[in-house]
Amino acid sequence: MQRKKSINEKCGVFGIYGHKEASTITYHGLFALQHRGQESSGIVSTDGKLSYKHLGMGLVADIFSESKVLDELKGHIAIGHNRYSTTGASKIANIQPLVFNLFDYQIAISHNGNLVNTASLRKKLMEEGTIFQTTTDTELIIHLIAKSKSKKLEEKIREALNIVSGAYSMVLMTEKQLIAVRDSYGFRPLCVGKLGDSYVFASESCAFDLIEAEYIRDVNPGEIIVIDEDGLHSYKGKCNPKYCIFEYVYFSRPDSRVFGEFVDKTRRQLGKNLADEADVDADIVISVPDSSNTTALGYASRSGIKFEIGLIRNHYIGRTFINPRQSQRDFGVKIKFNTVGGVLKDKKVIVVDDSIVRGTTLKKLTKLIRDAGAKEIHVRISSPPIKHPCYYGLDFPSTDELIAGKMSVDEIKEYLGVDSIHFLSTKSMLSATNKDPSEFCSACFTGDYPIKVNEKQDKEIFEN
Amino acid sequence: MQRKKSINEKCGVFGIYGHKEASTITYHGLFALQHRGQESSGIVSTDGKLSYKHLGMGLVADIFSESKVLDELKGHIAIGHNRYSTTGASKIANIQPLVFNLFDYQIAISHNGNLVNTASLRKKLMEEGTIFQTTTDTELIIHLIAKSKSKKLEEKIREALNIVSGAYSMVLMTEKQLIAVRDSYGFRPLCVGKLGDSYVFASESCAFDLIEAEYIRDVNPGEIIVIDEDGLHSYKGKCNPKYCIFEYVYFSRPDSRVFGEFVDKTRRQLGKNLADEADVDADIVISVPDSSNTTALGYASRSGIKFEIGLIRNHYIGRTFINPRQSQRDFGVKIKFNTVGGVLKDKKVIVVDDSIVRGTTLKKLTKLIRDAGAKEIHVRISSPPIKHPCYYGLDFPSTDELIAGKMSVDEIKEYLGVDSIHFLSTKSMLSATNKDPSEFCSACFTGDYPIKVNEKQDKEIFEN
Amino acid sequence: MQRKKSINEKCGVFGIYGHKEASTITYHGLFALQHRGQESSGIVSTDGKLSYKHLGMGLVADIFSESKVLDELKGHIAIGHNRYSTTGASKIANIQPLVFNLFDYQIAISHNGNLVNTASLRKKLMEEGTIFQTTTDTELIIHLIAKSKSKKLEEKIREALNIVSGAYSMVLMTEKQLIAVRDSYGFRPLCVGKLGDSYVFASESCAFDLIEAEYIRDVNPGEIIVIDEDGLHSYKGKCNPKYCIFEYVYFSRPDSRVFGEFVDKTRRQLGKNLADEADVDADIVISVPDSSNTTALGYASRSGIKFEIGLIRNHYIGRTFINPRQSQRDFGVKIKFNTVGGVLKDKKVIVVDDSIVRGTTLKKLTKLIRDAGAKEIHVRISSPPIKHPCYYGLDFPSTDELIAGKMSVDEIKEYLGVDSIHFLSTKSMLSATNKDPSEFCSACFTGDYPIKVNEKQDKEIFEN
Amino acid sequence: MQRKKSINEKCGVFGIYGHKEASTITYHGLFALQHRGQESSGIVSTDGKLSYKHLGMGLVADIFSESKVLDELKGHIAIGHNRYSTTGASKIANIQPLVFNLFDYQIAISHNGNLVNTASLRKKLMEEGTIFQTTTDTELIIHLIAKSKSKKLEEKIREALNIVSGAYSMVLMTEKQLIAVRDSYGFRPLCVGKLGDSYVFASESCAFDLIEAEYIRDVNPGEIIVIDEDGLHSYKGKCNPKYCIFEYVYFSRPDSRVFGEFVDKTRRQLGKNLADEADVDADIVISVPDSSNTTALGYASRSGIKFEIGLIRNHYIGRTFINPRQSQRDFGVKIKFNTVGGVLKDKKVIVVDDSIVRGTTLKKLTKLIRDAGAKEIHVRISSPPIKHPCYYGLDFPSTDELIAGKMSVDEIKEYLGVDSIHFLSTKSMLSATNKDPSEFCSACFTGDYPIKVNEKQDKEIFEN
């Protein structure tokens, strides 16, 4: 499950209400959601009076490596956040959950997604004397909540969210309440479960499996759910689903239920559709481990070609790897993958991968496979070419670094130096799920954006 | 490739002579050998005059995470060591490579294996006034070398090694020489390669793949190889091979060449032999990832039963994982593995694993598989029951913790709560290789030890 | 100069405009002002575009122990702050200089002093939706500046300060300006100097000596000074001096010029006045080093009694000192002071100290002196009994811990077990300076407060 | 008491037998002896079975800043060591106490002093196969003990010490015994005391004052004292006193008893002798604080000239101080000392200092004093010119860096730019004590060495 791409989900969120060890359960939830953000994590908890916070750069298991850290995060309510972010000391203030002191309560927030068109709103507030503590779009929501004249928290939140637009699956917390909110498109996943008498929220259901909670349902697009001492209160809102198809293609864990369906099943179907659409004569099917394993098995079962392990993935990789100074060699891909000589030698090989971003890694991989003696290499990708940026929570490289933004499919084949290549069609991709194709956002493939974005303004936001 | 067992190889060793960036290459070699020891690592280098040393607890990529550390390890000769060891500050002195100042030269040593029957010899030297710096058996060799009256280093080493017995694949280094030595049984692997004009030694050939060195041959059992400015000098010794069969079953990387053969090929054959010996009617074959993947594919191909991914392995695991205080739940196995519900539900499942040590992990895994809805569970193990300790370099739990030391195969089946179980026979295991069965040590399965061990004395050694 | 008391100045401030190495000079300035705050320090600098910040807990020399830290604090304007504060991770947000992002500029602030009567104002702002980042009274000033409709920064500042009251000697900084401000009473010192073409501000002139800057004059009570590319601009305000007399008695360095006069000279005069007021027959005069050395020399010169070194002070003291677990002994005072046996034995000893707070340290010291063989002990204190809290920037223990709040002078003599004691009278204390006595605040001795304080509300402030 | 010179005592030692909190008492003892070594410290303790060790670079209070560190140093016997040493990671192995595993016991050692003529002996042992762990001369003693055929420890020690020569005041420790040893010249101090039923050893008696132990007597030159469960056993040896006069002049704390006499008293007499030998017409006497304070008071009392505080010493100095990059200014002396303007202006000033090494610091100090307005400056030094290296435990700069090795007294006066200078004569210096002048080593002034040194060989030793 370790990520290999230069695409990054920006976040995973988790929240729990009504558990004696709320922070420890949150830590477990974040651990299960590690693949959604690996550069910083944080937990905020409350015992109804005071709040407690711990955050850091790095992996969940390293940030919360001592039980005393969790012991100090007291209370029965907690929220947590895993984040992918640009590094840099100046950005430590941006590590979520963010915590703010409002007039008569404290509020903490974990946000998955991105707001759009926020620049002018932020400017207006600052001109009036509002002081921002971070450069996140998330903070904007809190200032709007703080300035709301409404009485009830759910009304303040609704009022604030009516002013902004974009993608947000978030959990918030005060000393008394746990709140889950999802934008009306439902770009990013968020589901609700029960653990004994406690309520839990998580980006993906795999977090429930680890903590042995029961999956109940998705938080609906447009819905606000408030948990307090009287139980669960649902406040419905406009619902116009545009689920992110990339969650099925690559991001979510295969053992998760996302948008109401098992990822593993959809991913296997992607492999089958790929075999249907572009089968080829070959000796073996191999995957680029680990994210494409299920897809490759789907391909192999539909095509009848033997599945083999042709690439071994090294999981010991740390933050840095030091190359020799005086060498031109690039160890980048070799430290992650080694080929299994006996498997590949003199074979016609189908290589299944989920997507191509820059293409540089796949180029090196196919060279390794060729060097190991493969006679033919046929690349099969379980999604269409990526040509457009995502404004709703994924972190692609800039458009001009996307290989499909610069090259035709034939040119990509030449660039990779392979015998054939096929990208799954958008239609076939969307048909791998049980939902209506219109319920998905596939803007990164098609350029068809559900929400218009003022690109010039948002550049500012996306650079933070 | 991340280890899951309570069996541990004690070490991986690496050495290089004649390279401008000897320490960086050694770091790469150790990185590729990470699976042979994950608790401490060290590198010693020399520029012909001074020697440089850096070591630490943890993974290679963390200990050598800054290029300036490698820059300070100057020189054209270097050796390195990965180690599994009992933790504890008092044992930091034991992290290898060990370095000693002898009269007119310095000597550094990286040792894979264990000496036996050393207690009385150590006692005698101490009575005469010799002061030991560590509690390792490795240091004994150095004192014997220091006290040797022979002139040449290879003679001093031969003289010292004639006094001790046991398992040792080691590399040594002075300001002028790189030396590789293997005991006459060749218990542990050690091979020699070339990288341009430089000579390299490594426990497994996967280290050569990463650094793009060429595999030449194994260091022979009983051989001493000295590299100096005049090139390679081989000094042959008694050769009576007793290779460790566990290197094929579990330890070595599938992409390595060990004892002259590809591990991947032997491991696939182990799976086929297992299907031959004990096939069973089932819907799917799954492996306990990642170490049994190749074996399970071998089993599936021979039996014709479909290979599936039923267990997802989490690779984000750090040193510690904190359980809830007030819960009886054991997260131990759940944080490493999650089941894929759709794959297992209502299926007859063959679970392929390489070996059983205590049985506790497998018991939890089979329960997870049962909870995911499997109709039948058939466990297939690609090695015989482990019943005896290893004195030659593997770190098993004490004999009374080995499940096969306490239970019959039927009792193990009951304990695991599975529908059937089969351990591969010793004969069939040894026939999976191309060598004569008599060339292997399988003492941990059979109790037939190539070297007699004075258990009482050695207890002292093994506790250090 | 190391502090020994449980009285603490809350802060030292420094600022510089127009120097290539502004942050390094600021570091030197803070180093010279270390005695005004030893628990945290920080520097903020700007190059006219971006701002840079580094702060930490501990001493200046430890926080800025690497030149690269200063190299990263780029720019030609910088301000710094030394602070005494209650410890605790939750208060790290309070370490100054504080930095805030306002609409079209950034503002940083270093504040020496305390505002009073701020609770209701803070409450009103929060009710309107203002979010506070710290629990400092300093932040209140910034929000008032941010909300000001005035155009020029000096007007915004004046407008904000007209709303609050209390003690403040502060330096502020934007990307373009360095500003120094002092309240109309001038409780705390602040002076301006020149270093080549650069302007500098500091709490005490000893900072100018170290950086070799020239002392110009005090920032006047009520004055706002703005330094920008056009030079120095002074904006006068109401001036009603109430200088803190304790700066002369104890806080300021003897080599500083404070409120326009040399501290050393005033302190020597305090000793002379003390001898005039309460001389006694004795063999030697000793001081409690180092803060009372000058006063004791003044006493000795006026009385004609020989000055001796009877107490040796240990300067190696770190943050903590560990007492034996199973002992009733208190090493507290012994680790700081040791007596010189030959000097004290069989002597009548006058012990000169500057003030008594709790009296516990002096009690232990006089016991040490008695144990060393002193025949008589006469305590002479160069200030009156402290009976009242300070609301203007000193951190006394709570009133009921002040020994003079609970005991008469005779009772204090009994408590200390000394042969006589004398506190300098308020009148004599104030006459040791060249100023009119009415220009001083001596509220901690007399209870006569220049600004009325709403004690109930301010409790909240002072606990932060 | 903080050191300012480029002369360094190499060590302070401490030991205790028979106390429940032996390591905590040792920590206190080392704290009191901090001035004898400020670069590393260590403690070794034993509970009669196991031994415990903690050491580090830096000050005692920082290395032992947590009580749990002391709690882990269990047992009723402990020894400690403060050390001045050249820094560098490679020398961490040299931090004392050193601990060695001998045949049937462990031995730890803290050594103050230097052996001489050890090079050939070390070479001989290494040729025979002995492996050294450190580059200290101290280790040589341990190997000689290990190889001794004698039965009793005191005999082994005597036998080993008969082979070496040089200066050593040391404490050793096994699981059962505490041993104190002093060479027959007694160069370096070492005294014995009692704390309840426990015995204690320390370099200076000030350590006894802090722990409230009773000073008994000096360990005699040539004596071995063994403490075990039967009490104190003294083994006398050859005694030919050559006490280091520099302990009185500069090193020892003024409140210590050293070589049986109070340092304070001797130091005051040095000041008086200096006034007798070279009085001059002046207005005030000032000292270079803190080490010359007592001497200056002695001078003032004998001459009748007024003692004043003209230099303020800053005690906040950390390990490093960063100078501006683009400035020629040297802050070196200014960060330590500031002048008190009012005291010095227009005055004829006598500056009393204990010794001159390189002269660079004093040159800067006298310039500061001149800049503060002094009319005349008369330097008075309470020891003769230092012209020769010390081989017995002091760390002077190399001979050609000693100002008195290169210049006559007149030239030094010119170099310093002062009106007069006088160095106390050797005869007058030695007459300040109550002992016979022949009982002192003053080789650094006279070149008259009690033990001949083979300089060429020892260079090697002294460079380590």
Image (cartoon, coloured by chain):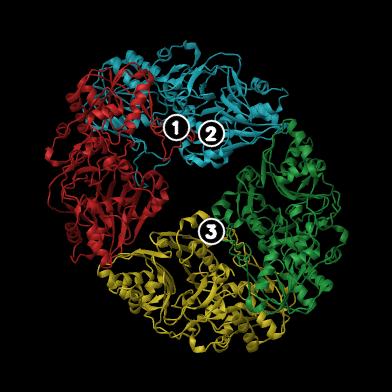
Chain colours: A cyan, B red, C green, D yellow
- The three-letter code of the residue at mark 2 reads Ser
Q: Quickly name the residue at label 2.
A: A23
Locate residue B91 relative to residue D307 in the image: left or right.
left
Q: Residues within 10 Å of mark 2 (few under 14, many from 20)?
A: many
**Which of the labelled discs sits on residue D62, or is there none?**
3
Q: Position of residue C58 (x, y in %)?
A: 60, 54
Q: How many numbered circles are shown?
A: 3
User: For the residues marked 2 and 1, what is the alpha-carbon distance in whole angstroms?
Assistant: 17 Å
- Element type at marker 3? helix
- The three-letter code of the residue at mark 1 reads Gln
- The answer to which image quadrant residue A413 occupies is top left
Q: With respect to residue B291, does C69 lie above or below?
A: below
Is there CB contact under 8 Å for labels 1 and 3?
no
- Element type at marker 2? helix
- The three-letter code of the residue at mark 3 reads Asp
Q: With respect to residue C283, does C179 lie above or below?
A: above
The residue lying toward the viewer, choosing from C20 and D158, is D158
Report in which chain the residue with disc 2 lies.
Answer: A
Discs 3/2, front: 2
Q: With respect to residue C254, does D287 lie above or below?
A: below
Q: Position of residue A425 (x, y in %)?
A: 40, 15
x 14%, y 33%: residue: B427
Report in which chain the residue with disc 3 lies.
Answer: D
